[in-house]
Amino acid sequence: MFRRIALIALILVSLTVPCGAYDPQSVVIRLERGPCYGSCPVYGVTLYGDGTVRYDGKDHVRVRGSHTAVIDPDAVRSLVEEIERSGFFSLNDAYAQVGITDAPSALVYVAAVGRKKQVSHYPGDFKAPKALETLENRIDEVSGASRWTAAAAGTPGLSAVDERAAPVVVAVPDSVIGRETEMQKIVLRRSVATSLRGEAYALQQKGQLRDAVIRYRQSLVWWPDAGLESYVVPLERKAGFTSSQYRPETGQAAAVQATPGNAAKKAGNVVATIRNRSTLDVTILTRGESADAGTLVRAGEILIRPVQLGPNGEVTFLAVRDSQTLASKTWQGNAAAESVVPALLYDDNLPDRLVVMTGLR
């Protein structure tokens, strides 16, 4: 009798326990909307379990470039529950039949409750379930994407600041592997920014404003945030220095001053941000450069320095230690876009050791 009761209880528990426990730190929900024949807004919006929202505006939107906001984490959790109820994880990977032409495509990626799923959707496919379109609209609503995408008709009148802030759009392979790689980069970029802001706050509490501002500024390269930008400006004035000064002993500070006519802003040059998260020093240089004091990045250090772009806007970075090349990565930039810069992370514990991403300065 006891065994029978225990068996019934076990069955009831198994029916009520979800397939994966909710972990806010692992939640990533992304919606990407593609172009159409007309002026459809082209953008991507990503929600994280802690309430962070990242927006990337590309074309026919009111605001271009990368921006972040914060919403109630419970709203994200409720959205995850909606996604589960909608049967999203059992949908086809693609609905791409062409019933009508020139419609804007959409792509939804969800990582939550121990599962990952990506679904591409072309509205011209009449076999696509209505629940998928509803979910796409719900992601827009919960993220508050309209704050950036609304009034798209005014796009030609974007201010000069908005135009300069538009990042270089890097094509991502339309595959699960390509999407996973891009999501990992986003999570890594956000993780580095969060770490830097934590360090900055701790330094600020100790009264070390100069070092705090440097950390805040570098976090903005990895993860743009207009609110933090406004917060840093008065701290910068109080500290009495410009944000690009970090290692005056190597002579780099003078080279990266953010003032008009400076060499770092000449065509063909960008200011790179390099973070060494390892316990050992490493030399990070560009192809053709010689290793010296200006290219050495000490353990745990952040280095800001100008680098020369190639004829097509590219620059190849090498990670060297003890005369041995440990990693090599190429960044594709744009000499005409001064706000788009390379952001590098070196870590001996990473599979590729060197990660090169695009940040906004």
Image (cartoon, rainbow, N blue to C red):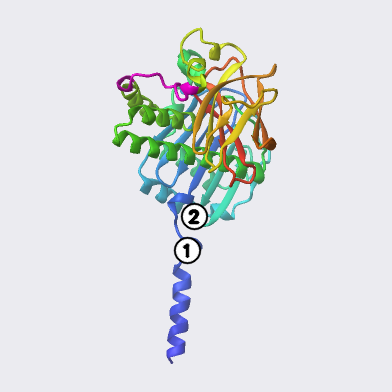
Please give left or right for residue 68 compared with residue 343 in the image. Answer: left
Quadrant in which residue 208 is drawn: top left
Helix, strand or loop status at disc 2: helix
Amino acid type indicated by mark 2: Glu
Q: Residue furthest bottom?
A: 1
Q: Earlier in the sequence, mark 1 or mark 2?
A: 1
Amino acid type indicated by mark 1: Pro
Residue 59 image offset from top left, x and y in percent: 55, 23
For label 2, count other residues whose C-alpha is less than 10 Å away and answer few (under 14), some (14-19) or many (20+): some
Q: Marks 1 and 2: CB-CB under 8 Å? A: yes
- Res. 359 visible in picture: yes
Q: Residue at x 59, y 16 (%)?
A: 269
Q: Residue at x 36, y 26 (%)?
A: 210
Q: Say which mark, if any, is on residue 18.
A: 1
Q: Quick one: quadrant of the N terminus? A: bottom left
285 or 24, which is in the foreground?
285
Which region of the structure is painted magenta?
A: 237-249
Please give left or right for residue 205 compared with residue 6 in the image. Answer: left
Quadrant in which residue 283 is drawn: top right
Residue 275 image offset from top left, x and y in percent: 52, 34
346 or 309, which is in the foreground?
346
For label 1, count other residues whose C-alpha is less than 10 Å away and answer few (under 14), some (14-19) or many (20+): few
**Label 2 belongs to which residue?**
84
Q: Say which mark, if any, is on residue 342.
A: none
Q: Residue at x 50, y 21 (%)?
A: 165
